[in-house]
Image (cartoon, rainbow, N blue to C red):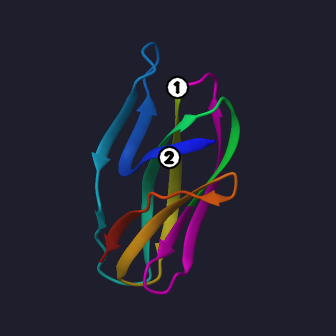
């Protein structure tokens, strides 16, 4: 069993060599766009989980909150080595198209189970 601790939308993120510390750059909750459909060149979604040791499948889904239309998704793997350890995932989205102005959500699924944290952001 795993617990999703947080989801962050940002410009960039990386794990520092040597210290293994998570570095997050440019946290935001709005993407500016003048015309639609709009294509955003790059953004990062960072997730942090804790739980039982093991390998887990993760899926990040970006949806339009009004239409429930999926605009992007990114599968990934999580590995928790030992109890009480946290695992991070840094997922990069490139050239994501947003069909219209509005609120969008980031949904996280771990082993096909939707997690209870939903992060929202605005495009427009």
Q: Is residue 75 magenta?
A: yes
Q: Residues within 10 Å of mark 2 (few under 14, many from 20)?
A: some
Q: Residue at x 62, y 22 (%)?
A: 82
The part of the chain drawn in magenta is 61-83
Q: Residue at x 52, y 81 (%)?
A: 68
Q: Main secondary structure of the magenta part?
A: strand
Secondary element at tag 2: strand
Q: Is residue 21 above or below residue 32?
A: above
Q: Is residue 55 magenta?
A: no
Q: Residues within 10 Å of mark 1 (few under 14, many from 20)?
A: few
Residue corresponding to mark 1: 84
Residue corresponding to mark 2: 4
**x, y (%) of residue 101?**
35, 83
Foreground pick, 60 / 1: 1
Q: CA distance from mark 1 to mark 2?
A: 13 Å
Q: Where, by quadrant of the figure, is residue 72 drawn?
A: bottom right
Q: Residue at x 42, y 66 (%)?
A: 40
Instruction: Left or right? Give the position of 46 relative to 89.
Output: left
């Amino acid at each position: 069993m795993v617990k999703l601790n947080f989801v962050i939308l940002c410009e960039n993120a990386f794990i520092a060599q040597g210290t293994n510390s998570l570095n997050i750059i440019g946290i935001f909750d709005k993407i500016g766009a003048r015309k639609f459909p709009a294509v955003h060149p790059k953004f990062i979604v960072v997730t942090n989980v804790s739980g039982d040791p093991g390998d887990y499948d993760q899926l990040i889904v970006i949806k339009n909150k009004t239409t429930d239309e999926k605009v992007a998704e990114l599968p990934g793997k999580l590995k928790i080595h030992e109890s009480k350890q946290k695992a991070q995932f840094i997922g990069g989205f490139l050239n994501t198209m947003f069909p219209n102005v509005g609120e969008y959500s980031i949904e996280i699924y771990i082993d096909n189970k939707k997690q209870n944290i939903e992060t929202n952001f605005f495009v427009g």
